[in-house]
Amino acid sequence: MSDPTATALAFWAAAEARDWSAFGALLADDVVYELPQSRERIRGKATYLRFNVEYPGEWQLTVRRVVGERGQAATWCDFVTDGEPGEALTFFEFGETGLITTITEFWPEPYDPPPGREHLVERF
């Protein structure tokens, strides 16, 4: 696949289906997966596949938004893991062959905003 949006959607479809063969087919052999918030990095297709296959608990996901162009894509997904809802922002980079070479994922946690800007913002 050379369309970043289609590849990102195929990535999540394969993950949700637990179709690890299709999932792995989208990854470069030297893919790097990074979680900046926990400062974790996984290198290589085999290790990243194992990370996903062995991920604990029951989970489902829904892609809320995807954008992609020129070798990059970003997704915003809703997750439910063991009954707990969450969101993830995932950024993909693709190599010349269209395979995913880098995945950077953020799992935002809600927090209360600092005081002093109430007159500028609308809370939702």
Image: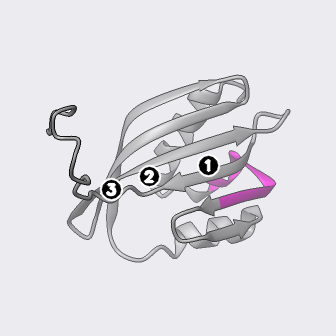
Q: Is residue 28 magenta?
A: yes
Quadrant of the rendering where the C terminus is positioned: top left
| Nearer the observer, 4 or 89 | 89
Q: Nearer the viewer, residue 22 or 95?
A: 95
Residue 17's disc number: 2
Indicate how the structure is coloured in the image: one colour
For marks 2 and 3, give the CA distance. 9 Å
Residue 36 location in percent, x, y? 58, 62
Q: Nearer the viewer, residue 78 or 12?
A: 78
- Helix, strand, or loop for circle 2? helix
Left or right, residue 44 beside residue 89 = right
Asked if disc 2 and disc 1 are in contact, CB closer than 8 Å, the reply is yes
Q: Looking at the picture, how far across and down is residue 7, in whole percent? A: 61, 34
Residue numbers of the magenta segment: 21-33
Is 53 placed above or below 15 here? below
Q: Give the amino acid at mark 2.
A: Ala
Residue 22's disc number: 1
Q: Amino acid at mark 1?
A: Ala
Q: Position of residue 85 (x, y in %)?
A: 24, 58
Q: Give the numbered dot on residue 60.
A: 3
User: Does the magenta run of residues contain 47?
Assistant: no
Eye-nearest disc, 2 or 3: 3
Q: Residue at x 20, y 34 (%)?
A: 121
Q: Amino acid at mark 3?
A: Gln
The image shows a total of numbered marks equal to 3
Give the CA separation, mark 1 to mark 3.
17 Å
Q: Is residue 67 left or right of residue 57?
A: right
Residue drawn 67% across and 32% down? 72
